[in-house]
Amino acid sequence: QNVNSYHDKTSAMKHESDSYRIAEGFSDLYRLRHGGGTRFADLLDLVASVDPEVRIRFTSPHPKDFTSDVLEVMGKHPNICKSIHLPAQSGSSNVLKLMRRGYTREAYLDLVKRIYTMLPGAELSSDFISGFCGETDDDHKQTVSLMKKVGYAQAFMFAYSQREKTHAHRKLEDNVPNELKLQRLQEVISAYRSGAEEAARNQIGKYHLVLVEGPSKKNEKVWQGKTDGLRRCMFDPQPQNFINEPSELERIINGQNHTNDADTNPNKRRPVGIGEYVLVQVTEATPSTLYTNLLAITTLSTYATLSANA
C-alpha cells in the first residue's frame, strides 16, 4: 500500500530537497518523511533505467504522493507504463473528510488534470465505496458525476462494510441502510460501464504496443497480451499480412495508413514469441478486451523512438 510514499533514509542518494512535499492540495495524517535519502521518484528512475525493454508498473499508490517529480519520471521513461491506479473512494468532499483521505474533490480533479497534461494517453483506474457513514444522496450524486467526469479505464466498486479497529468503526455510525448502499453501488457501476463502453468504441482503429503473454485460455489459436494502459488484447499470432520493413512501421506510427504492400514474404516471417512486443490495430472492442490485427513484431525502444518522432 502507498508504494509512492517510499523513502529510504539509509541510501546515500540525496533528494533534490530535504523537505518532502506531497501533491498540491493534499494533506497527510502522518509525520512527513523529511531528510535525505531515496524517494519514490528516485527509485522509479533507477529501476526504469536498468533495461529499457522491460515494462515497469507499480501499485498501489496514494493520490497524495503523486508529486510532479514522479509524473516527470514517468514521462521520461517510455518503459514506465502510463496506467495509474488513483483511488478516489468518493466524489464528495464531505465524505472524503469523514474518510480522512486528506484531499477534496477539487484537489483530486486537479491531480487528474495534471496527470493527463503531463502524461498524454494515460489511463486511470480507481476504487470507490458506496454508502459510507453519513453519505447523503447529494454525496452519492457527486461520486457518480466524478466517475463520469474522469472516465476511468477500470474501477473497483464496493458497498461499504464496517471494519473493526478502524477510525470509522470507532468514531462514526454506519447509518446508511444496506438496501440503499446496494442501490447506490449499482448506479456507480452503471456510470462506470457507460463511460467504459464509450471509451471502448473510441479504441477502434487505434494502434497499440502490446506485450505478448501467450495463447488465450479459451482458444489456443488466439493469443493475448497487454497494452501500456493494461488493456487486454486478442490477436492471431500468424496473420497473412505482416510488416517487416521499419519504414512501413514508421508510417503507421506517424498516423498514415499502411500500404498493404508491405513485405509479406513468408520466408521472412517468424512466429511471435511470449515476452515480445508487437504492434496491433484495434478492430473490435469491449470495456474489458480489445480485438486486434497483429501488424508487426517490434521492440519497446523502437516503438518509443518512432512515436517520439511522429
Image: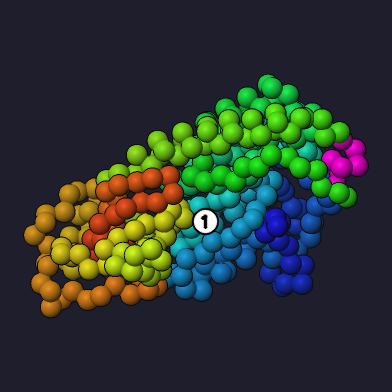
Let me know if residue 103 is in the magenta part: no
Residue 78, percent from left and from top: 44, 60
Residue 65, percent from left and from top: 68, 50
In this rendering, position of residue 163 left or right of residue 219 = right
Q: Which residues are magenta?
A: 166-172
Residue 133, percent from left and from top: 79, 33
- Farthest residue in the top direction? 138
Residue indicated by mark 1: 74
Give the residue type that dot 1 points to.
Met
In this rendering, position of residue 196 left or right of residue 271 = right
- Which residue is at a point 69% across and 46% down the rendered structure image? 64
- Farthest residue in the front direction? 179
Front residue (pair 149, 7):
149
In this rendering, position of residue 234 left or right of residue 181 = left
- Which residue is at a point 11% across and 54% down the rendered structure image? 259
- Which residue is at a point 47% across and 73% down the rendered structure image? 51
Quarter of the figure that contains the N terminus: bottom right
Color style of the picture:
rainbow
Provide the major secondary structure of the magenta segment.
helix
Please tell me in which quadrant of the rendered image residue 8 appears. bottom right
In this rendering, position of residue 88 left or right of residue 233 = right
